[in-house]
Amino acid sequence: MSELIKLTGVQKYYGDYHALRDINLTIDQGEFFSLLGPSGCGKTTLLRTIAGFEGVSSGTVMIAGRDMADVPPNLRPTNMVFQSYAIFPHLSVAENVAFGLRKSGMSKADKATAVDEALTMVGLAGYGARAAHALSGGQRQRVALARALILKPKVLLLDEPLSALDKKMREHMQVELIRLQRAVGITFILVTHDQEEALVMSDRIAVMFEGEIGQLADPETLYRRPNSRRVAEFIGKMNFINGTASATDEGAKVLVPGLGKCTIPAEQFPQGVTTGEVAIGIRPETLAILFEGDKAPRHEAEAVVDEVVYYGDMTYYDVRVSEVEKPLTIAMKNLIGRPVLDVGAKTRIAWDERSLVVF
Amino acid sequence: MKLRIYALAYLLFLYAPIILLPLFAFNDGTIIAFPLSGFTTNWFAELTENKALHAAVRNSLFIALMTAIFSTLLGMCAARAGAMANFPGKRGIIGFVMLPLVLPEIIVAVSLLVILRQVLGVNLSNWTIIAAHVLICTPFCIAILNGAFQNLDPSMEEAALDLGESRWSAFRLVTLPLVMPGIISSMLIAFTISLDEFIIAFFLTGTNPTMPVYIWGLLRFPASLPVVMALGTLLVALSIILLTIAELLRRRGIKRAGGTDKGGFL
């Protein structure tokens, strides 16, 4: 894959406020890239910088090998789907979709064909004559997509496009967006604060905090090997236990209070092997409650159920383990014949040193 | 129940003088007093023959039209800046722009007369009245247009820009149609205010009086009082029609832009 967008040393100040701090990243042709972070982390600012709505204080934005410094948004090979969708309410659906073709010099018939194709692509065939202000949220979003994609941009920018939809619609549109992106082969850059959405949809994710990129990786690496505690806490749920570590040749011996001792390789220390006091991260689904008939785990410990949250497909337990201050969260699949434990039940829990991340 | 009686009394007090206008405009008698002496449309017929009145009405219409155009243009600039841009001292500046709304008109009139005649040495004409009317109408226009511009999603213009339009054509193709009802409503209000404005016009009028100034002159002749009543009836009807259109357009504009009505002038 070839490099399409390259940001080098991008800084952005609003007065004294440092909105973007030294952003360096490259995005490939055809990639589904996400900017993920809590509100106010600068992800939307970064997207608007690529679109050209915000200038940079220093650094360069290159798209397709061209410096974008003096290129206004209307001349950039990017199109945007706005958070509010910004569907023009005084125009029909077809007029909205055809808006960007005004300067294309296409004939009326060609435009109509292009509009029909774009509407079909987003599943709105036959909606052209409708008034834009009478559409539902999901339909508006599709119109916004069609309106942007009809121009065949090199990059499609999506600013929290799913945040205004309800849960069912959101999940449905996630899948549709992925399919659409594969079909058109255009680079998508998605801004979202929803970590699940980013994990589901992206090839790569840049997690941003306070104007800088905390980690840039594919979803699996991001989830399994977060490079810092704040990334680990932002992506999914993670238990943290304060323990101690002592370095060995290939990694470290780690003492996890309440659970036991183990030896883990250096790669499970994302910030390098540290000794002494460490924070040990364990994902809820890598812990397990031991039921009768389960095969012997690598490690086990005594625990008392403190809280039970039943989700239907899953049950989340908070369990207390001696020597550990905060209860540990354990996610269990509700398999056939597996009981749901009551609060106060004594149980044994299984853990695996391969799932630990140590900071 | 008590409240309803109060409300009725209040409305009667408010509108009784206006109800009297058409009553005496159609009354066959030169004395404005009860009992009414019969129905006539003579006074309206007399209106159509008065050349001096026609000239005054033409003056007023011209002044009102120009005032509507200029104060709406200024109002658009202010409302757009207020809604879309952020700059230091914004609140203070907007406050100052809105100030003529509460300034006593007599003070505005006297100080404008002094400045125009003594300081600038300008001859009084329709244009001096227009300038003064723009001053007092602009705050009203800003108040109306603020609603239109603030209901507008700032992403709209950006979306047009993003789709390849220049800044000007983005404004023309997207923003302008969406705020158009507000613009028309603002023009109608400014037109109405200017049309029946008396104090400033009285001070700043040149050799050609405006309609309100001419009416005031008529009052010295008791015999022409019913004609004034007839003219007043027409003016009230015109004002009500224009303001109703303005309000309907304002509501339609908000609905079209997909916003919620946060209350206007009416």
Image: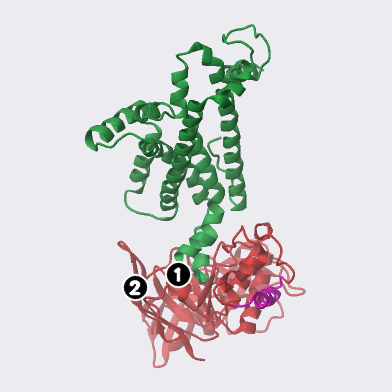
Asked which secondary structure carries label 2, the reply is strand
Q: What is the span of residues highlighted in magenta in the rendered image?
A: A106-124
Which residue lies at the image location 61% right of the left edge and 80% below the top edge? A181
Residue B145, percent across and down?
A: 49, 46
Residue shown at 63% from the left, 16% from the top: B23
Q: Residue A306, labelled with which disc? A: none
Tell which residue pokes out farthest to the top in this image.
B35
Residue B211, x across and y down, in percent: 47, 28
**Res. A290 in view:** no
Res B96 → quadrant: top left
Residue extending furthest toward the bottom: A249
Q: Residue A48: give its label.
A: 1
Q: With respect to residue B249, does A123 lie above or below?
A: below
- Name the kind of residue labelled 2 in the image: Gln
Q: Who's the residue at 45% across and 72% down the image?
A: A73
Q: Chain of mark 2?
A: A
> Which amino acid, mark 1?
Arg
Q: Say whether disc 2 or disc 1 marks the residue closer to the N-terminus.
A: 2
Colour red maps to chain: A
**The disc label shown at residue A11, or none:** 2
In magenta stretch: residue A119: yes
